[in-house]
Image (tube, rainbow, N blue to C red):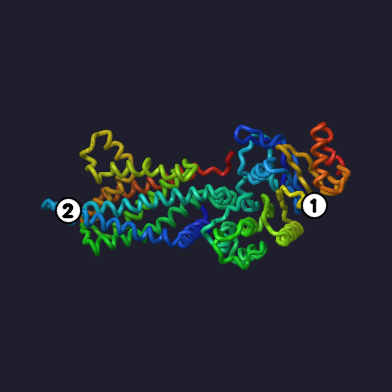
Amino acid sequence: MNPRILAATTGRILRQLRHDRRTIALLVVVPSALLTLVYFMYADQPTPPGQPSAFDRIALVMLGIFPFVIMFLVTSIAMLRERTSGTLERLLTTPLGKLDLLFGYGIAFGLAAAVQAAVAAGVAYWIFDLDTAGSSGLVIGIAVIDAVLGVALGLFCSAFARTEFQAVQFLPVVVVPQLLLCGLFVARDQMAGWLQALSDAFPLSYAIEALQEVGANAEPTGTMWRDVVVVLGAVVLALVLAAATLRRRSG
Amino acid sequence: MDDAIAVHDLLVDRGGRRVLDGISCTVPRGAVTGLLGPSGSGKTTFMRAVVGVQVVTGGTVTVLGLPAGSPALRHQVGYLTQAPSVYADLTVRENARYFAALHGRGRAEADQAISDVGLARAAGQLVGTLSGGQRSRASLACALVGEPELVILDEPTVGQDPVLRADLWARFHAMAAAGTTLLVSSHVMDEAARCDRLLLIREGRLIADDSPAAIRAAAGVDDLDEAFLRLIRAGESGPTAATAGREAS
């Protein structure tokens, strides 16, 4: 990796994003709009005594899931465009290193996700009175790590897609199983053993658990830090695997 | 070490078909070498092999003294793909500055590369809104911005108007005079006459490797188009005649 090339690549990806105003608007507005839906869905639901309200429980998890799903999709398509436009092959004939490109995407979309997460968290806390025992800063920080996880998995999966049709199919293949088993619908310890094993193997499960730890505890817990480390480890693993799938030579 | 590129017995298979069938040739330094041949003859595959992005079946390709695709060559080789490979959602200037940064060059070099290809007035325009010819020049600017020692250009003048084409060829010769080696592909024979040296390939085989004058002399005609036709016919009737052009030099 070369700091100058990494910075140029990150800047280039952000400039591409800046020219696409509609995408910026969608990135910023959609999570807040969906949170609004969730708020009104649960507005009249009774809360059992001594438990967090349904909105508090679900909105917190959503703050982690939105950036993960959105950045996975955006990255898969962005990388596929690099392949089909020939720019990827051209980049690989320049002094750019594979990790310069992959980390460039991770940092650029991570920054975009930080804006997105801050806006969504602002709406959740100030307009809808989201209540978490831990700090909102930790919630946003974990949401950004979730976004970077989405970017890393998107970069890796895009290697296996030749067309846009294939790329979007990786959403149900890679993202939906992680959503189903992350503990949002059924608590992980109440699932059948083999489902728990699958859930334990999915990085999103740890990301969601980290958010739930912040929701339930005033101070950062050991479990939360372990979860954050697991997710970051998954990010690095996905990026290294993605680098291994980038071939400078093709047939 | 006089040759910029030395190719020996190059074999390439793509999709189960032999695309390059035993090509051996050299490209001299500081000159414009034309790679001529009809569409589908293997020009792009040959250039990809020189740049080092093509998986080859056999043979060797040596570029500036190193095996093609060596990491050190990424600083010294500029490659223009046939389809313009620039970012459509960035302006011409943003594209040029990005590729300049990859080669450790600054804004001044980026602006120079843009004006060298005649795009100064469109520098602030998004590449996606340019005409086909402008877009391919934007791509060319990005290939030249690193001031590489060896420039591989795959059909750089397609779709350009005659005045611009003449300007670009003058630019290529100025670069060669300054010591840059250029390998330029074309399927238009009238561009062949502008090259210092010609490689003609057809169906994956090298048919001629000489200067335009020597090729004309070997075929006994003034028109290069006609000369190539004769060389091809001669090659089909007997393998010894195919090297007539080379022997004449």
Horizontal and vertical percent position of residue B234: 83, 36
Instruction: Check disc 1: other Cα within 10 Å, few if <14, some if 14-19, many if 20+.
Output: some
Q: Can the viewer see residue B203 in this picture? A: yes
Question: Which chain hosts label 1?
Answer: B
Mark 1 falls on what kind of element?
A: loop
Q: Where does the C terminus of chain B fall, quadrant-wise?
A: top right
Residue name at image x 24 percent, y 64 percent: A127
Residue B152 visible to the viewer: no
- The crowd level at tag 2 (other Cα within 10 Å; few <14, some 14-19, many 20+) is some
Q: Residue at x 52, y 50 (%)?
A: A82
In the displayed structure, does residue A130 sit left or right of residue A5? Answer: left
Q: What residue is rendered at 36% in x and 42% in y?
A: A172
In what element is the residue under mark 2?
loop
Measured from the top left, where is residue B97 in percent x and y? 57, 62
Q: Position of residue B208 (x, y in %)?
A: 79, 41
| Residue matched to label 1 | B193
Name the residue rendered at 80%, 35% in the picture: B235
Q: Is residue A58 left or right of residue B128?
A: left
Q: Residue furthest left?
A: A49
Which residue is tagged 2? A52
Q: Give the alpha-carbon distance from disc 2 to disc 1, as whole Å.
A: 81 Å
Rendered image quadrant of residue B93: bottom right
